[in-house]
């Protein structure tokens, strides 16, 4: 069989090449034609051959067949008397490294698979590509690559934290906001680590960060020349928390508003007539809007805080006595009762107790009762309904009566929900939410005033006028707004927040890179140690290049035309490399995942190329 020269790299000097096809595997045999080799220890030229041996390599698949290459190479004597090596193996070009059992272009393909798909998926695709390796091998290929982090950035960076394990250990990601690339990952989020990194990058002029104190101090210590910009996302998150605290402090007023609002709407609400229990309206409203906390220890703490405050003790003294934070004590003091925590299993079952305990429902199955109240607006599942019904019958102190009335479905809003509603435009709210907000604006002018100030704050980032933030803060100081604590926090970091208002940079891109980091970490399951994860993130972000002279290697699968022969390979491209090739054949792996691309190319190559291109003569 005539040996097609394109199967092996052009840089290898080989002779006596032959090819054979055995059991679906293409085996290539060749001999090295080098007569000398360089000693890896001292660099002297070795001319005396010691012996020969066979090296076995894997190469890229051809025509759907896996390829094994057997090269008869030599061992040489080192004649340098000062050298520690007396015998060394033959050295080849950069296509074959010592101790490696794959050609470099084969390793490069596996590395690209690992960066796109991770260990398990990369190993699965490698089997489809007739280049089978294990998931551990795929990850080892990435781990062995030398990481060359960009030493000079554009000067505009964003930093944020990311979680090794949420709530326990965190790291820091550094992103070049101008080049849209990850620059580096840091093993923690301490200010000393951030400052040390910034000292090594004196070209940094802009640092976009969240409002954490460690990043603020670290940026000030490591890059005092840089302008700091507060993250807008965290600004609005802090604003939402401030609004939520405002509504939590108005617990008594909100409970009264819920009762009055539902009572005023009860006349216009159409519900089926039903017989309810003999309770007066005030008791029903109280039972449906006020739910005591189910945990007795929390109720005991709440009562103790109230008693100590009535005795004249300070908040600090109460904190030491009860053992809870001062922020929690202030929240307790602003409440008349301790509301029940609303968890994932909380429902509005209490609103339907009266309807369920009437005489006409006696003897009905739980499934029928559940279906009836679901039509009336019950928001719980059947399992939770059965549990609540059993508890209701155990502690039932209510007696049915014969008079009829319509059940009033109480609609309430949590402090977090009201916070979101206050930040939205009225056009984005539902009709019922908009009516309730208009009711609150009319009844409590402080809420209406706060809503107007929130809209003004959002417009600051649209107009980007210098001095507008200071004017807004002055308006807050002269008002009875419920977000004065938020304004006080802005003053403590005024310059960074003001830069966020007037500058075009933000940490939005950094949050996106953190999300991509999470996907890579989860794709690697428990194997994502810091060094491996750092390499995966930076390689995937395009920071790795082999040298200054070579172009970046793109993951491109295409049909390479060379002297009327066609082969499938992965190689670096430039304009002159792909000139004359139909554009439909050139597809970047950044736009099309290797998960779909490689099987399609293999199928196309097997069905078409092998039939029409390879014409091996029958004779010598």
Image: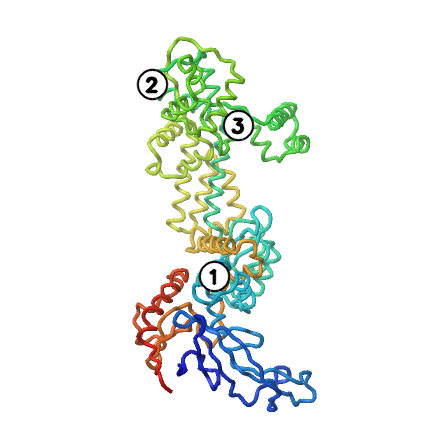
Circle 2 residues within 10 Å: few <14, some 14–19, many ≥20: few
**Pointer 2 and pointer 1: residues touching (CB < 8 Å)?**
no
Name the quadrant containing residue 375.
top left
Cα gap from disc 2 to disc 3, whole angstroms: 29 Å
Circle 1 sits in a helix, a strand or a loop, which is it?
helix
Cα gap from disc 2 to disc 1, whole angstroms: 61 Å
* Left or right: 393, with 379 as reference point: right
| Precedes in sequence: disc 2 or disc 3 | 2
Q: Quadrant of the N terminus?
A: bottom left
Circle 2 sits in a helix, a strand or a loop, which is it?
loop
| Precedes in sequence: disc 2 or disc 1 | 1
Q: Tell me where residue 571 appears, x and y as whole percent.
A: 42, 73
Circle 1 residues within 10 Å: few <14, some 14–19, many ≥20: many
Q: Nearer the viewer, residue 146 or 4?
A: 4
Q: How many numbered badges does the structure rendering display?
A: 3
Task: Determine which of the numbered discs, if any, sits on residue 340 in the image.
Answer: 3
| Precedes in sequence: disc 1 or disc 3 | 1
Compared to residue 537, the image places residue 457 above or below, namely above
Q: Quadrant of the C terminus?
A: bottom left
Name the residue located 56 percent from the left edge and 89 percent from the top edge: 36
**Pointer 1 and pointer 3: residues touching (CB < 8 Å)?**
no
Q: Nearer the viewer, residue 494 or 272?
A: 272
Residue that mark 2 sits on: 272
Q: In this view, which residue lies farthest toward the top?
A: 402
Which label lies toward us, 1 or 3? 1
Cα gap from disc 1 to disc 3, whole angstroms: 49 Å
The answer to whether residue 59 is visible is yes
Residue that mark 1 sits on: 122
Name the quadrant containing residue 587.
bottom left
Compared to residue 608, the image places residue 223 above or below, namely above
Q: Tell me where residue 388 appears, x and y as whole percent.
A: 49, 24
Q: Tell me where residue 574 appears, x and y as whole percent.
A: 38, 74
């Amino acid at each position: 069989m005539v040996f097609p020269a394109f199967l092996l790299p052009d840089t290898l000097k080989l002779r006596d090449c032959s090819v054979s096809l055995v059991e679906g595997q293409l085996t290539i045999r060749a001999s090295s034609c080098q007569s000398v080799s360089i000693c890896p220890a001292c660099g002297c030229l070795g001319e005396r051959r010691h012996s020969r041996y066979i090296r076995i390599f894997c190469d890229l698949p051809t025509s759907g067949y896996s390829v094994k290459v057997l090269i008869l190479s030599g061992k040489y004597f080192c004649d340098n008397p000062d050298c520690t090596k007396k015998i060394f193996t033959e050295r080849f070009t950069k296509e074959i490294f010592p101790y490696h059992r794959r050609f470099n272009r084969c390793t490069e393909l596996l590395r690209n698979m690992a960066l796109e798909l991770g260990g398990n998926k990369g190993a699965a695709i490698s089997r489809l590509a007739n280049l089978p390796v294990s998931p551990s091998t795929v990850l080892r290929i990435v781990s062995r690559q030398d990481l060359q982090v960009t030493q000079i950035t554009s000067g505009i960076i964003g930093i944020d934290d990311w979680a090794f394990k949420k709530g326990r250990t965190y790291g820091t990601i550094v992103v070049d906001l101008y080049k849209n690339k990850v620059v580096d990952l840091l093993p923690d989020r301490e200010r000393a680590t951030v400052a040390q990194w910034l000292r090594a990058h004196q070209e940094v002029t802009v640092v976009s960060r969240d409002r954490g104190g460690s990043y603020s101090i670290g940026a000030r210590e490591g890059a005092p020349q840089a302008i700091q910009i507060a993250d807008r996302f965290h600004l609005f998150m802090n604003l939402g928390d401030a609004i939520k605290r405002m509504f939590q402090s108005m617990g008594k007023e909100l409970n009264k508003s819920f009762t009055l609002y539902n009572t005023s709407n009860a006349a216009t609400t159409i519900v089926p007539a039903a017989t309810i229990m003999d309770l007066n309206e005030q008791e029903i409203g109280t039972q449906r809007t006020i739910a005591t906390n189910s945990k007795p220890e929390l109720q005991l703490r709440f009562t103790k805080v109230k008693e100590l405050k009535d005795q004249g003790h300070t908040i600090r003294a109460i904190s030491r006595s009860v053992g809870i934070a001062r922020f929690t004590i202030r929240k307790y003091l602003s409440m008349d009762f301790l509301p029940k925590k609303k968890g994932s299993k909380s429902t509005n079952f209490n609103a339907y107790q009266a309807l369920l305990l009437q005489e006409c429902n006696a003897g009905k199955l739980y499934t029928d009762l559940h279906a009836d109240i679901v039509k009336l607006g019950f928001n719980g599942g059947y399992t939770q309904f059965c549990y609540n019904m059993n508890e209701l019958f155990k502690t039932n102190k209510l007696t049915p009566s014969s008079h009829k009335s319509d059940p009033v479905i109480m609609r309430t809003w949590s402090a977090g929900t009201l916070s979101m509603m206050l930040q939205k435009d009225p056009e984005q709210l539902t009709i019922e939410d908009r009516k309730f907000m208009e009711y609150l604006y009319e009844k409590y002018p402080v809420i209406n005033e706060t809503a107007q100030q929130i809209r003004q704050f959002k417009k600051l980032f649209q107009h980007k006028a210098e001095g507008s933030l200071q004017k807004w803060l002055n308006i807050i100081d002269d008002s009875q707004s419920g977000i004065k604590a938020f304004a006080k926090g802005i003053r403590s970091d005024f310059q960074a927040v003001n830069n966020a208002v007037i500058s075009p940079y933000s940490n939005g891109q950094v949050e996106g890179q953190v999300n991509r980091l999470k996907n890579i970490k989860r794709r690697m399951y428990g194997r994502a140690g810091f060094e491996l994860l750092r390499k995966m993130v930076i390689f995937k972000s395009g920071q790795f290049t082999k040298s200054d002279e070579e172009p970046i290697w793109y993951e491109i699968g295409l049909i390479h035309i060379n002297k009327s022969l066609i082969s499938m390979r992965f190689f670096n491209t430039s304009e002159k490399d792909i000139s004359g090739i139909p554009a439909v054949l050139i597809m970047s792996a950044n736009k099309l995942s290797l998960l779909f691309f490689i099987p399609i190319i293999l199928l196309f190559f097997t069905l078409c190329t092998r039939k029409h291109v390879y014409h091996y003569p029958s004779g010598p």
